[in-house]
Image: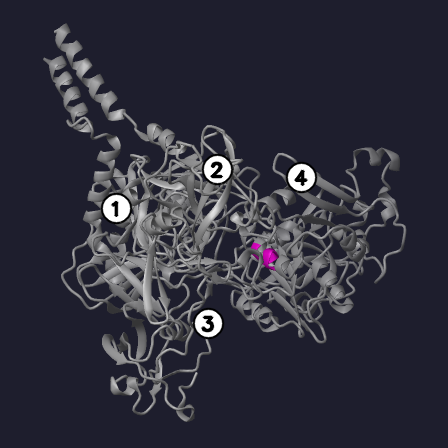
C-alpha cells in the first residue's frame, strides 16, 4: 500500500515538473545576447535618443529601424555583456523602415573584419520559416524606456500574435510609409526605444523587428506591431516594378552594394478617368453616392446609375468621397477597377475600365 | 478501497495536464487549445463595414474638457451571429458615428447590405440583419459557470488578413478578471479589448462564448463611454446568456431601455454603511404606483437582501424598462412586500412647485420668515409680505386643526416640494404688520426665470449675524425681524480662537495629491451657513486665479455669505470626467470645515470649465444645486431631475462666440427636462468673462437658490 502511494506521488511529481517546465527564461537569455541597445541623436520634443537593434552577423552587423535616432556621427552600441562600441550606418531602406549598422573598431577601416565573433540571428533562415499565425505565443525583447544600460538585459514581454495584416499606420497627421503586412501583438510592446527590438517565437527564433509608436488609422488606437523579417516592398521606377525584401537588403548592404535610395514620393497623378460625378462633398465623411455619370464615360458604359453608393473598390471599403478619390488617384488609364455599389438593398459588382482624361472642356468635376 | 481510487484519480488528473510527449510543454498545449477555440468560434464572427458618418464621436462642439470626443477609425469592425436568419449583434460604438450604410460579411457568405433592427441602450448593443439563412450560432457559457481566472479570448475582425492560409481573426488572450461589473451588466477581462474587437466575442477556451465585447464604464452610459480604457487590461463583455434572454424582444424590433424605479437615496453621512433609506419617490414612477413612500427602507429586491443603496443600484442596474420586481421595504419597523413593481423607461419630469418667496436663513425659531416675495408670484397674489412668518401649512381641504407646523426653511421646502404645482394650500401666517395671525390661501405655481435683482439684505436672521459690519450693506433696508442688538455675541476675541481661517487660502491634500484654493470672506462666522461657489478653471489652471475671483466676488461673498473653492485639474488637457470624484472630495473637505448652506452649492465655470460644471451638476446630485456657466456647451444628454435634489441653471453665451448656437441649445434641452434655466445672450460679446449687468444677475441668481 505504502509503495503504491510512493510510486503514485513520484509519478505525479515527475509529471508536474514536466508540465511546469518553462522555456521562456532560456529563450530570453539567448535572445538577449543577440540584441543591442542603441544610443543616438534625439532626446528632445518627445523623440527618443535610444533604441534597440538585433545582431545579424558575427562581424557586428546590426539591423534596426530607419529612425531619426541614427542621424548622428556618434552612434553608440551596448552589447549584452556590457561592451560599449561605436557604430556607423551602412545603409537604410525607408520604404521597409529598416537600417543596417556596423560596429566600428578603433584603428580598423569600415570594410575590414572587426574580429568580433558575436552571437547573431540568421536573417535568410528566419525569413524562410513559415509565418506565425494569430494565437502563437511570442516574446518581444527591447530596450523600451531606456531601462537597460550596458550589461543589463533588455526587457522581455510575452503576448500572442493578434493578427497578421496590412499596416495602416498614422504618425500624427501623416500616413506611415510602410503598408505591408505586419505582425500585430496583443502586448503593449511599441514603446519609446523598443523600435528595432526582436519579436521571437517561444524558441527564440526571429519573427520580426518591433515597430514604432503608431496609431492605426483603421481603429484609431495605438498599434503594437513588428515588421516581419521577410517583409518586402515594391518600387515603381517608371513602368518597371522591382521589389526588395529585408533579407535582400541585409545581404546587399553587408556586401556594400546597397544604394540607399531617396524616399519615393507617392505618385499622385490625376489617376484614370471614370466619369462619376458624386453628390456634393459637404460632410466630414460624405458617402460616395453617385449623382450622375458623364455621358459616354467609363462609368456610364459600365452602367453605374444615380443614387448608387460606391462602397468598395477592389474589395477595399471606401467610407467617403475622399477615400474613393485617394484610391482612384493611384489607378492608371487602361486599368480595370472592380467596384461594389449599393443599389437598393443589394451590393452590385461593376467593373470600370479607366480611360485617359477627356479634353479639358469636359474635365471630370471635382 | 478509497485510497486507491483517490490515487488513481490523482495520477489520471496529472496525466491529463501533462501530455505524454516530453517536448510538449504547457505553452504548446495552451497554444493548441487557443487555436482550437478560435477555430470553433470563427464561423460566428462577422465583419462589419460602413460608409459615411462622422470623424469624431461623442464630442461636444468646441472640443476639450470632459467631452472632447473620440476619433472613429475608418476600418472594419466586428459582430457576432446570434440567430440563424442573418442576425448579427455588435457594439453600438461601431455605429456611434452614424454611418449611412452598413455592410456585413458572415464567414463563408458574400458581403451583404445590413439593416439596424434594434438597440439595447442599457448595454450599448446594436442588432443587425442581413438577408441570409441557416447560420450557426454560438453557445453561451452560462453566467453561473463563469469564474474569475478562466481563460478568455477576445476576437475581432478589424485587423483581418488578406492571406488565405492565415485565420481571418484577431485574437488577444487573457483571463476573466471579474463578473457582475458595471452594475451587474458585464464580465471583465484582461485581454486587450478595443475598437479592434468591440462587437466581437469574448470566448472561452472550450469554444463557447462568454459575451459580446463592448466599451463600458460605470461613469457613463453613452456609446463611447469606456473607450478611454481600451487595451488597458480592463475590458468588458456583455454576457451572451443575457443577450439571448432579450433577443426575442430585439428581434421584434423593440429598442431596450433602462428600467427605472423612481426612488432616490436619502443623503446620509456614510451611504455604504447605512440602510437603503428612500429620500424621495418620483411622481408617477414605478415606486409611487406601487405605493412605496419616502422614508421606507428597501431591504430586498426579488428576494435578494440589499443592505445599502449601492446594493439597490446593483440590483436595479441590469433591469430593463417593463421588468417586474418584488420589492420588500421596512416601514415603521414592519416588512412590507410590494409585488409587481413594473419599471418604467423614464421618470416623468415634473417642474418643482413654487411658492414665490425667499426665506430668511439661519433662523432657529419655529416657522419661516419671508425675506422677499417674488412680484406676481403665488405668495404675492395671496398677499404674503416680506417680514411675515409662515407658521403652519395645510393642503386645501384639510381642517385647520390638522395643519402641519413649519419647523424652518428645510421643512417648508420639503413640504412644498412634496406637492404638485397648482395645488392649493393654506398657510398660517404671523403678520409682520400688526402682529396678527391669519390664514392665507396660496395656489402653488411654477418658477419663472425672472431674476430678482437687488434682493434685500441681510439674508440671514439677525441673531446669526454677530458683529456689526464694516460697511452698511447696499440695497434695501434690512428686514430682520429681531434687532441684532438683542443677542450681541460674547467677546470677539474668544470667538476668533475657534473660528476657522478666512481670506484666500491654499489647500492641499498630499495623500490624494489634490491642490485647491479657498476664499472665505473675513466676516465668516460658523453661526451663518455659507453658500459655496466651485470655480472650475478653463483648460489649464491659471496662476493667481483665486485672487481674480476674490476681487470679483469678494464683496458679494461677504454680503451674501458665500465661500469660493477653486479645484485644480490634474490633467494637462483640462478636466476629464473621472476627476468628478476628486473635485467632490475637495468640496466635501470645505463642507466639513465650514458651515455650509447645502441649498446654495454651485458649480461655476467658463468654456471647458463650464462643461465640467455641467458634468459635476449631473453627477454630484447630492451636493450641487446650481450650475452657472459662460461660453460653455452642454455636451451630454441631461439626466432626469431628482426630487429633493433640485438643480437650476444659469447660462451665458456671447453673440461673437462661434459656438453661441450650440450654447443656446442647452436651454430648450434642459427646459424639456423641467429644469429651471436662465439663459442670457450678450451682444458684442465673445469668450470673455461676464459683463457687469450679467454679473449682477448671476449674483442675484446665486442669492436666490434657496427660493421656495
Q: Nearer the viewer, residue A340 or A229?
A: A229
**Which numbered tag is attached to residue A128?**
1
In the image: residue B6, left or right of residue B264: left
The numbered mark 3 sits on a residue in which chain?
A: A
Give the foreground label among 1 and 4: 1
| Callout 1–callout 4 Cβ contact below 8 Å | no
Which residue was labeled with disc 3? A284
The magenta stretch is B611-615
The answer as to whether the residues below labels 3 and 2 share one chain is yes
Per the model, the C-alpha gap separating discs 2 and 1 is 26 Å
In the image: residue B117, left or right of residue B682: left
Per the model, the C-alpha gap separating discs 4 and 3 is 50 Å
Task: Characterize the local packing of mark 2: few (<14), some (14-19) or many (20 or more) Cα atoms within 10 angstroms.
Answer: many
Which residue was labeled with disc 4? B592
| Callout 3–callout 2 Cβ contact below 8 Å | no
Per the model, the C-alpha gap separating discs 1 and 4 is 70 Å
The residue depicted at 80 percent of the width and 48 percent of the height is B521
Amino acid at each position: 500500500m505504502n509503495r503504491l502511494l510512493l510510486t503514485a506521488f513520484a509519478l505525479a511529481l515527475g509529471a508536474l515538473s514536466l508540465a511546469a517546465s518553462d522555456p521562456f527564461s532560456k529563450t530570453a537569455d539567448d535572445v538577449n545576447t543577440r540584441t543591442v541597445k542603441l544610443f543616438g541623436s534625439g532626446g528632445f520634443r518627445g523623440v527618443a535618443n535610444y533604441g534597440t537593434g538585433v545582431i545579424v552577423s558575427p562581424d557586428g552587423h546590426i539591423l534596426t529601424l530607419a529612425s531619426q535616432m541614427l542621424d548622428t556621427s556618434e552612434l553608440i552600441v551596448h552589447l549584452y555583456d556590457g561592451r560599449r562600441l561605436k557604430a556607423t550606418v551602412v545603409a537604410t531602406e525607408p520604404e521597409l523602415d529598416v537600417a543596417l549598422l556596423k560596429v566600428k573598431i578603433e584603428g580598423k577601416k569600415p570594410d575590414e573584419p572587426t574580429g568580433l565573433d558575436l552571437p547573431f540571428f540568421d536573417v535568410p533562415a528566419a525569413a524562410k520559416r513559415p509565418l506565425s499565425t494569430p494565437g502563437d505565443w511570442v516574446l518581444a525583447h527591447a530596450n523600451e524606456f531606456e531601462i537597460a544600460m550596458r550589461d543589463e538585459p533588455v526587457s522581455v514581454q510575452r503576448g500572442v500574435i493578434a493578427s497578421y495584416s496590412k499596416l495602416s499606420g498614422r504618425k500624427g497627421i501623416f500616413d506611415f510609409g510602410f503598408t505591408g503586412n505586419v505582425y500585430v501583438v496583443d502586448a503593449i510592446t511599441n514603446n519609446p526605444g523598443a523600435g528595432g527590438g526582436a519579436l521571437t517565437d517561444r524558441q527564440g527564433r526571429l519573427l520580426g523587428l518591433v515597430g514604432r509608436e503608431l496609431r492605426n488609422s483603421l481603429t484609431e488606437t495605438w498599434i503594437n506591431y513588428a515588421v516581419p523579417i521577410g517583409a518586402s516592398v515594391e518600387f515603381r521606377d517608371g513602368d518597371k516594378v522591382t521589389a526588395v525584401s529585408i533579407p535582400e537588403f541585409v545581404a546587399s548592404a553587408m556586401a556594400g552594394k546597397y544604394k540607399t535610395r531617396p524616399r519615393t514620393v507617392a505618385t499622385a497623378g490625376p489617376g484614370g478617368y471614370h466619369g462619376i460625378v458624386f453628390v456634393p462633398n459637404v460632410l466630414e465623411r460624405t458617402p460616395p453616392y453617385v449623382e450622375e455619370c458623364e455621358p459616354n464615360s467609363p462609368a456610364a458604359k459600365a452602367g453605374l446609375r444615380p443614387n448608387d453608393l460606391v462602397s468598395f473598390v477592389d474589395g477595399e471599403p471606401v467610407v467617403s468621397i475622399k477615400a474613393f478619390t485617394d484610391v482612384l488617384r493611384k489607378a492608371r488609364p487602361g486599368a480595370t477597377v472592380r467596384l461594389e455599389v449599393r443599389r437598393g438593398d443589394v451590393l452590385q459588382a461593376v467593373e470600370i475600365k479607366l480611360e485617359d482624361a477627356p479634353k479639358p472642356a469636359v474635365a471630370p468635376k471635382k | 478501497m478509497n485510497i486507491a481510487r483517490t490515487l488513481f484519480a490523482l495520477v489520471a488528473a496529472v496525466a491529463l495536464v501533462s501530455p505524454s510527449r516530453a517536448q510538449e510543454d504547457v505553452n504548446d498545449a495552451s497554444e493548441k487549445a487557443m487555436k482550437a477555440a478560435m477555430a470553433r468560434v470563427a464561423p460566428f464572427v462577422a465583419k462589419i463595414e460602413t460608409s459615411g458618418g462622422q470623424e469624431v464621436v461623442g464630442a461636444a462642439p468646441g472640443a476639450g474638457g470632459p467631452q472632447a470626443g473620440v476619433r472613429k477609425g475608418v476600418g472594419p469592425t466586428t459582430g457576432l451571429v446570434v440567430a440563424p436568419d442573418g442576425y448579427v449583434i455588435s457594439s453600438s460604438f461601431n455605429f456611434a458615428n452614424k454611418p449611412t450604410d452598413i455592410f456585413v460579411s458572415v464567414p463563408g457568405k458574400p458581403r451583404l447590405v445590413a439593416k439596424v433592427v434594434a438597440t439595447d441602450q442599457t448595454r450599448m448593443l446594436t442588432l443587425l440583419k442581413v438577408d441570409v439563412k441557416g447560420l450557426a450560432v454560438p453557445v453561451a457559457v452560462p453566467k453561473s459557470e463563469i469564474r474569475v481566472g478562466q481563460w478568455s479570448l477576445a476576437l475581432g475582425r478589424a485587423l483581418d488578413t488578406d492571406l488565405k492560409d492565415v485565420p481571418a481573426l484577431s485574437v488577444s488572450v487573457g483571463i476573466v478578471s471579474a463578473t457582475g461589473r458595471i452594475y451587474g451588466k458585464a464580465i471583465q477581462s484582461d485581454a486587450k479589448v478595443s475598437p479592434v474587437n468591440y462587437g466581437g466575442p469574448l470566448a472561452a477556451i472550450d469554444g463557447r462564448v462568454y459575451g459580446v465585447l463592448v466599451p463600458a464604464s460605470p461613469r457613463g452610459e453613452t456609446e463611447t463611454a469606456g473607450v478611454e480604457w481600451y487595451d488597458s487590461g480592463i475590458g468588458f463583455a456583455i454576457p451572451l446568456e443575457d443577450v439571448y434572454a432579450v433577443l426575442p424582444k430585439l428581434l421584434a424590433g423593440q429598442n431596450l431601455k433602462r428600467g427605472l424605479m423612481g426612488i432616490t437615496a436619502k443623503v446620509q453621512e456614510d451611504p455604504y454603511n447605512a440602510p437603503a433609506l428612500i429620500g424621495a419617490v418620483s411622481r408617477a414612477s414605478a415606486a409611487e404606483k406601487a405605493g412605496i413612500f419616502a422614508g421606507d427602507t428597501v431591504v430586498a429586491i426579488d428576494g435578494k437582501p440589499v443592505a445599502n443603496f449601492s446594493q439597490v443600484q446593483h440590483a436595479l442596474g441590469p433591469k430593463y424598462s417593463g421588468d417586474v420586481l418584488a420589492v420588500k421595504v421596512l416601514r415603521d419597523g414592519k416588512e412590507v412586500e410590494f409585488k409587481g413593481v413594473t419599471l418604467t423607461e423614464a421618470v416623468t419630469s415634473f417642474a418643482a412647485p413654487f411658492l414665490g418667496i425667499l426665506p430668511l436663513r439661519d433662523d432657529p425659531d419655529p416657522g419661516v420668515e419671508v425675506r422677499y416675495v417674488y412680484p406676481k408670484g403665488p405668495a404675492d397674489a395671496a398677499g404674503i409680505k416680506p417680514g411675515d412668518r409662515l407658521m403652519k401649512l395645510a393642503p386645501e381641504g384639510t381642517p385647520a386643526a390638522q395643519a402641519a407646523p413649519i419647523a424652518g426653511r428645510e421643512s417648508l421646502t420639503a413640504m412644498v416640494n412634496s406637492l404638485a404645482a397648482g395645488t392649493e394650500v393654506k398657510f398660517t401666517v404671523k403678520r409682520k404688520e400688526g402682529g396678527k395671525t391669519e390664514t392665507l390661501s396660496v395656489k402653488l405655481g411654477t418658477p419663472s426665470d425672472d431674476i430678482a435683482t437687488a434682493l434685500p439684505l441681510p439674508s440671514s436672521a439677525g441673531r446669526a449675524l454677530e458683529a456689526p459690519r464694516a460697511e452698511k450693506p447696499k440695497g434695501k433696508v434690512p428686514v430682520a425681524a429681531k434687532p441684532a442688538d438683542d443677542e450681541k455675541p460674547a467677546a470677539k476675541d474668544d470667538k476668533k480662537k475657534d473660528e476657522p481661517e478666512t481670506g484666500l487660502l491654499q489647500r492641499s491634500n498630499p495623500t490624494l495629491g489634490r491642490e485647491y484654493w479657498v476664499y472665505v470672506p473675513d466676516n465668516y462666522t460658523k453661526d451663518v451657513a455659507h453658500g459655496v461657489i466651485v470655480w472650475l478653471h478653463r483648460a489649464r489652471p491659471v496662476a493667481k486665479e483665486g485672487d481674480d475671483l476674490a476681487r470679483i466676488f469678494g464683496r458679494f461673498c461677504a454680503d451674501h455669505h458665500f465661500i469660493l473653492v477653486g479645484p485644480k485639474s490634474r490633467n494637462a488637457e483640462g478636466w476629464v470626467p473621472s476627476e468628478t470624484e476628486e473635485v467632490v472630495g475637495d468640496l466635501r473637505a470645505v463642507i466639513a470645515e465650514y458651515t455650509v448652506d447645502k441649498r446654495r452649492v454651485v458649480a461655476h465655470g467658463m468654456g471647458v470649465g463650464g462643461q465640467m460644471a455641467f458634468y459635476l451638476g449631473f453627477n454630484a446630485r447630492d451636493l450641487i444645486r446650481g450650475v452657472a456657466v459662460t461660453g460653455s456647451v452642454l455636451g451630454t444628454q441631461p439626466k432626469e431631475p431628482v426630487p429633493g435634489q433640485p438643480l437650476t441653471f444659469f447660462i451665458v453665451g456671447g453673440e461673437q462666440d462661434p459656438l453661441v448656437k450650440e450654447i443656446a441649445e442647452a436651454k430648450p434641452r434642459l427646459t424639456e427636462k423641467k429644469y429651471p434655466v436662465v439663459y442670457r445672450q450678450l451682444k458684442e460679446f465673445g469668450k470673455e468673462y461676464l459683463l457687469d449687468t450679467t454679473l449682477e444677475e448671476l449674483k442675484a441668481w446665486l442669492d436666490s437658490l434657496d427660493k421656495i
